[in-house]
Amino acid sequence: MINRKKDKGEKPKKEKLRVRLKNKFSNSFIGRNLKELTIRIKFLIQRLDRKIKQSVQFELVIAIIVCFLIAGAIYMVTNNLFRNIVYTSVIKYDYDSLSNNAESMARYIEENRTVDVNGEKRTIDINDNKYFQDVFNMYKHEGDLVFITDLEGNVLRKTPNVSNEKVDIFSVLKGISENKYEEEFSVEHNGRYDISTNQSKPKEFTALYPISLGKEQYYLVYKAIPTGRIENLEKTVENSFLAMVLAFLAFIILFLIVTKNKMKYIHEISEGLKVIAEGELDYVIAERGEDEISRISKNINIMAREVNKQIEAQKLAEKTKSDLITNVSHDLRTPLTSVMGYIGLVKDGRYDSEEKMKEYLDIAFNKSEQLKALIEDLFEYTKINNSDMTLEKSEVNLVDFISQISEEMKPFFEENDIEQILTLSDEKIILSLDVSKMVRAIENLLTNAVKYSYKPGAVIIGVYKKDNFVTISVKNRGDNIPEEKLQKLFDRFYRLDESRNTNSGGTGLGLAITKNIIERHNGKIWAECYGNDISFYVRFRM
């Protein structure tokens, strides 16, 4: 029980100690620098990863490096697999030992020319046969030929196996071999050595050293046949060419595998571009990745959408043009037919009384006025719709401007039993406007509100400012306008009365003209309808 309590008490202490040490290390100079270094490394890795994903060049470089490293590893492995071991035998002859013996013998004679004989020291001369025989036996091997000659080549001292009494010093010098000699043999790979068919006799070793005894000069000649020893060697033969070919093939295959998806994506873009070129502008190429190829597919999709929009706009323009011709023809023909008909009645005298003739002329005159209004609206719309038209702007107090227009239109409102209700801002709202054109726009809005209001009724005209925008509102109560028709109110020649009865509406150009004027002033116009409450809004940025 005591041990358990100790264990339970020690664990929190160890944990606290660990946390304390960790915090201490984190707050230390090394800890702070290590943390900063870790953050920088992570940032660099993220930046590099982003660069790689956004650049085809980086992707190709990384792919080449990876394929090259793998191909290099394959080269090393296959080179080891194809490595072959060839066994060779070398017979080496011990010329060094003979050379050392001859040199040591000559040096010994030079350094030990004085000997102790019965307590007396004397100098050795060439006649001390026993001395030289002892020296010869001390250094030579069995079978070696050693002798001493004078300058004329007379053999003065020799080993028993030397038969010559005189030698040619020049020939001896010529026979001195300075090159070592060895025979190398290649054998089969099973590890057996066979040199019986390649044996050859070694060259005779010859050495000549000048020595001096007293005042006389002599030559020490050492001749011997060296003994040979066989050394077994292993040679590694590599098939690097085959390993290189395999590594190259591996590199090509790996590169094709690594770039397969990218090439497949390029092919997909190519096929998609072909489909779009054939006229399917709604076709969308998949956008994968963040690199240049993905951006190409994105730009192709944008291009296709824009071209499709232009084609649709062109189709709409053609349809609108056709509708314009049809509507203008209808709207011009109807009043013109009436005018010609009633004037024809008067011309032909087909009336019963003076009052009847006057009635016919009044109808013809009214139809002529309608015809005139339509022509004026057409002219106005064409003029305003002209992109070369310039606005003649001036600074205007919008509150006073709207108030003046509503005052001038009061008789028109009263004739139609419509009350004006003004809710105008108390402060001045200064805007830069083309007064004549803006008057036309506001009058069209108010005229439209009167025509389509319940009678008797009221039209609420408001001007107010909020944030950096000023808004003009015209509200009335009338028949509900469905949402789909609200969107068409500002189209040219559009009327709520689809029968195009001129008695129930205007020319169909009023709101289209108004919209064009507002947009020329960088404003926005729209309509809203909730139940029987119809509202038109015009908004300008201050």
Image: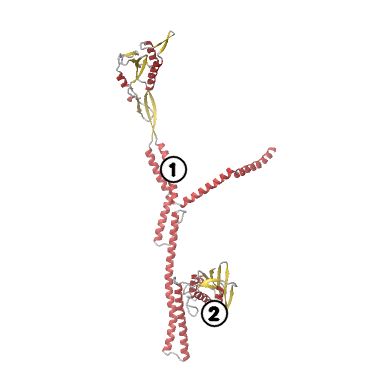
Q: Quadrant of the C terminus?
A: bottom right
Q: Residue furthest right?
A: 2
Q: Residue drawn 44% across and 45% down? A: 65
Above or below, 240 against 259 in this view is above
Q: Residue at x 44, y 43 (%)?
A: 69
Q: Which one is nearer the viewer's eye here, 239 or 161?
A: 161
Q: Position of residue 217 (x, y in %)?
A: 34, 16
When asked about the image quadrant of residue 238, the answer is top left
Give the residue at x 38% y 38%: 240
Mark 2 or 1: in front is 2
Q: Label 2: state its secondary structure.
A: helix
Residue kind at label 2, given as amino acid type: Glu
Q: Secondary structure at mark 1?
A: helix
For the residue marked with disc 1, what is the amino acid?
Leu
Q: Quadrant of residue 310?
A: bottom left
Kindly check if marks 2 and 1 are in contact, taking CB atoms under 8 A apart as contact: no
Residue 169 located left or right of residue 516:
left
Asked if 437 appears above or below 97 in the picture, the reply is: below
Q: Residues within 10 Å of mark 2 (few under 14, many from 20)?
A: few
In the rendered image, is residue 534 in sight? no
- Quarter containing the N terminus: top right
Which is nearer the eye, 246 or 229? 229
> Which residue corresponds to mark 2?
408
- Whether residue 112 is situated above or below residue 527 in the rendered picture: above
Residue 372 % position (x, y): 45, 80
Q: Position of residue 498 (x, y in %)?
A: 48, 75
Q: Point out the residue furthest to the top here.
A: 118
399 relative position to 70: left or right: right
Q: Which residue is mark 1?
A: 69
Mark 2–mark 1 distance (CA, rounded to whole Å):
88 Å
